[in-house]
């Protein structure tokens, strides 16, 4: 199997990844422009970037969990399915600021957004997996797939992440929809998202592809901190704040730090114990235009793990933090004044209350036992 893979940035050849003697080597081409860097943490230079495993920026695009298992099951007999092998398999269909090999050649019959939101088939997600699994460079362990969707207004093709759930985490789509609705109500930027009519699917539009098919750069905090996916719980919220200060452009630092603080407030009150390094990131046009990305992957994990704790430490603790604790963090790590932090905190509290009518409506609409469990649990957290 090919152990070399070319990398393009904004459709221009930038460099090459090579696997040699159990080392991953990335080198830029001599003519690569400084603006065609593959990562904010890997500026263009003559010296190679050598890692013992796939560089974090490239590893970020590999599937995990359910999706990885599906791909490995289908292709293990045909080709190697280690990290480099998976990147090779997925490379023809990876679409974004970074691309690999030759031009994207993946084509498949798209769905309409209405078909995803109001599915006519009970096995729609399995159909999506069969059609799009090999073309879904999505991290995270939750069952998910990247589906191509026709935009009726512009007649263009958009990409939506479609998430399902298994028996271990019942009604996770409903859980994420409620939590993301609270995040949106708090004034935190979020992608377009939907819940299917049968509550089986959570559907979210990719936020790194903007109008005219222009692709933004996106890097999660694992990449910015030089960590592999296995280390996504091995950090602190203080370190994320430092990463924001290090990589976000001066023009956007204040709003990004305030957004980060509000996300922590919402995550704390909803008891999201999965707010790890891969669930925060930055988006950018270039290295002078970097800001915190929209919020994503917000769920109440204590619905399923009743004594769950925070994913990362804050001031040395993973226990759910009090208002006083969070306000202190805002002051010491996010450079937010006490008065401003209290105002932002109150905005989050009001946003959580705005979700209650949605929860009450769903509770009054004959929910299943699992739906009732999720809704009542989130309501109890909001009302604390």
Image: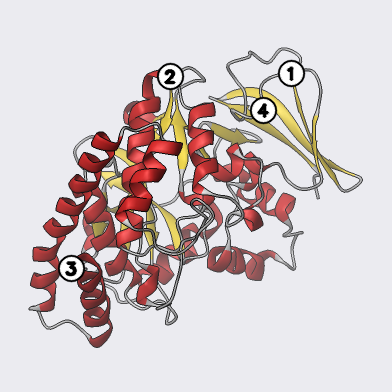
**Marks 1/3: CA–CA distance:** 54 Å
Mark 1 sits on what residue?
45
First in sequence: mark 4 vs mark 3: 4
Q: Residue furthest right?
A: 21
Residue positioned 45% across, 72% down in the render = 308
Label 4 sits on residue: 42
Marks 4 and 1: in contact by CB < 8 Å?
A: no
Identify the element where label 2 is drawn.
helix
- Residue 277 at x, y percent in the picture: 53, 49
Q: Nearer the viewer, residue 180 or 265?
A: 265
Q: CA distance from mark 4 to mark 2?
A: 20 Å
Compared to 341, does 290 lie above or below? Answer: above
Please name whichever residue, 319 or 194, is drawn nearer the observer in this view of the structure.
Answer: 319
Of circles 1 and 3, the one toward us is: 3
Q: Position of residue 18 (x, y in %)?
A: 80, 38
> Which residue, given by chain and number where applicable, does mark 2 sit on?
250
């Amino acid at each position: 199997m090919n152990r070399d893979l070319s990398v393009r940035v904004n459709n221009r050849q930038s460099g090459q990844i090579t696997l040699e003697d159990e080392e991953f080597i990335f080198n830029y081409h001599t003519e690569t422009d400084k603006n065609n860097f593959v990562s904010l943490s890997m500026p263009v230079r003559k010296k190679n970037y050598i890692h013992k495993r796939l560089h974090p920026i490239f590893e970020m695009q590999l599937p995990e969990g359910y999706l990885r298992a599906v791909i490995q099951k289908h292709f293990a007999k045909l080709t190697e399915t280690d990290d480099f092998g998976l990147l090779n398999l997925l490379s023809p269909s990876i679409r974004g600021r970074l691309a690999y090999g030759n031009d994207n050649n993946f084509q498949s019959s798209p769905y309409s957004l209405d078909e995803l939101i109001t599915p006519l088939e009970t096995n729609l997600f399995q159909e999506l997996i069969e059609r799009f699994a090999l073309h879904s460079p999505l991290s995270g362990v939750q069952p998910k797939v990247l589906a191509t969707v026709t935009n009726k207004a512009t007649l263009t093709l958009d990409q939506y992440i479609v998430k399902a759930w298994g028996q271990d985490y019942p009604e996770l789509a409903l859980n994420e929809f409620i939590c993301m609705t609270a995040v949106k109500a708090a004034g935190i930027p979020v992608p377009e998202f939907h819940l299917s009519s049968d509550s089986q699917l959570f559907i979210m539009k990719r936020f790194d592809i903007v109008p005219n098919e222009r692709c933004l750069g996106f890097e999660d905090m694992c990449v910015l901190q030089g960590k592999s996916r296995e280390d996504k719980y091995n950090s602190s919220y203080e370190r994320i704040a430092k990463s924001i200060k290090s990589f976000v452009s001066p023009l956007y630092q204040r709003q990004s730090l305030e957004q980060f603080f509000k996300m922590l407030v919402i995550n704390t009150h909803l008891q999201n114990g999965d707010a790890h390094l891969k669930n925060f990131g930055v988006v950018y046009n270039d290295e002078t235009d970097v800001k915190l990305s929209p919020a994503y992957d917000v769920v109440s994990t204590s619905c399923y793990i009743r004594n769950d704790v925070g994913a990362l430490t804050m001031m040395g603790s993973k226990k759910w933090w009090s208002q006083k604790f969070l306000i202190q963090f805002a002051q010491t790590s996010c450079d937010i004044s006490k008065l401003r932090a209290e105002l932002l905190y109150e905005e989050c509290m009001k946003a959580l209350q705005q979700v209650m009518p949605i929860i009450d409506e769903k509770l009054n609409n004959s929910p299943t036992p699992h739906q009732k469990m999720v809704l009542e649990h989130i309501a109890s957290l909001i009302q604390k």
